[in-house]
Amino acid sequence: MKRILNLFTIIAATLILFGCGKSDNNSSDGKIKAVSSITIINDIVKNIGGDKVDATSICGVGLDPHTYKPKPNDPRLVSQSDLVFINGFALEHWIEEMVHNAGGNKTVVAVTNGLTPMTDEKGFGDPDPHAWFNVQYVKTYASNIAKAFIEKDKANEEYYKKNLESYTKKLDSLDSWIKTEIQKIPQEKRVLITSHDAFRYFGKAYGLEVRGLQGISTEAKAQTEDVKKLIDLIKERKLNSVFIETSVNPKLLEEISSETGATVGGTLYSDSVGDEGTFEGTYIGAVTHNVNTIVKALK
């Protein structure tokens, strides 16, 4: 009898353990568990979800989502979530297996749904995923996020709608400010040279010519010919600044700077926001930093 009771205790403990690994509709404090692929999306989720949502980003601050290698705990974050927010446009190949292994009907929301991507001109043929650099497109991100929260938590529909309205106004204000600031740069100097081709949406929306040393993905290695073309462009156009990125190794662009005499105009946030708790730790803060850095260096 004692052995039977001990066996029963072990089985019960095992069932409890496995039960803890399953995802509930909400966390223990009643909040929706939202997991985002990147910090940029995670910040927008926080703005829309407010205190109704427990938000986490898989690819952390300063990390490169193009080459991200999942950590051991990442699959558990996905399996225990209520909603998974991804950018889409072929950015997060690494999250597909996590979602598949999570089982059940995991709700995955591509925040770019409804947008038409720019296409890659020199890399892997993937669509350009960096749609967040057109601030007007981020309104679509926010709208898709709000829709997902409302479908999951109908009782708080007005709360999410109110947050969406407030955030949309902030985005419109940011968009108008960027257009005004870019006008301070002489037309012939509106050339943005960066580590990888992450800013084409930004250039198209706000009137800058954009050249990246690498393609739209940092997986695309810069070729000798690419380096030479960029050096020739800088010398021919007499450009005085290039820009490195927080999530990309700056070494090669720094060498180009040394070769051409063009200074490093500053560091831009491309695939990640800044450290949590800082001004740049939000999407709006990171974009504001980028614009201030670009205008100061180019004008």
Image (cartoon, helix red, strand yellow):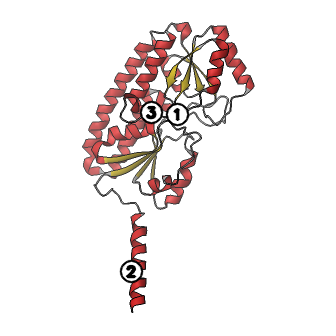
Specify the label residue 273 is tagged with. 3
Quadrant in which the N terminus is drawn: bottom left
In the image shown, does 141 or 27 lie closer to the viewer?
27
- Name the residue at 54% across, 35% down: 129
Do the residues bearing badges 2 and 3 touch, measured as CB atoms within 8 Å? Answer: no
Q: Amino acid at mark 2?
A: Thr
Give the alpha-carbon distance from disc 1 to disc 2, as whole Å. Answer: 56 Å
Q: Tell me which label, 1 or 3, sits earlier in the chain.
A: 1
Residue 137, relative to residue 234: is it above or below? below
The disc label shown at residue 116, or none? 1
Q: In the image, residue 226 lies at what x, y percent? A: 70, 23
In three-dimensional space, the C-alpha distance between marks 1 and 3, rounded to whole angstroms, equals 23 Å
The kind of secondary structure element at disc 2 is: helix
Which of the pair 252/232 is nearer the observer? 252
Determine if residue 54 is in view: yes
Residue type at tag 3 = Val
Residue count near mark 3 (Cα–Cα under 10 Å), binned few <14, some 14–19, many ≥20: many
Label 2, label 3: how many angstroms apart (C-alpha)? 48 Å
Disc number lying in front (2 or 3): 2
Crowding at dot 2, Cα within 10 Å, few <14 / some 14-19 / many 20+, comes out as: few
Residue 199 visible in the snapshot: no
Which residue was labeled with disc 2?
Answer: 9
In the picture, residue 30 is in which quadrant? bottom left
Asked if marks 1 and 3 touch (Cβ < 8 Å), the reply is no
Please indicate whether residue 264 sits to the left or right of residue 15 in the image: right
First-in-chain label (1 vs 2): 2
Q: Is residue 232 above or below residue 165?
A: above
**Which residue is rendered at x = 56% and y = 43% of the image?**
68
Q: Secondary structure at mark 1?
A: loop
View extreme (bottom): residue: 1
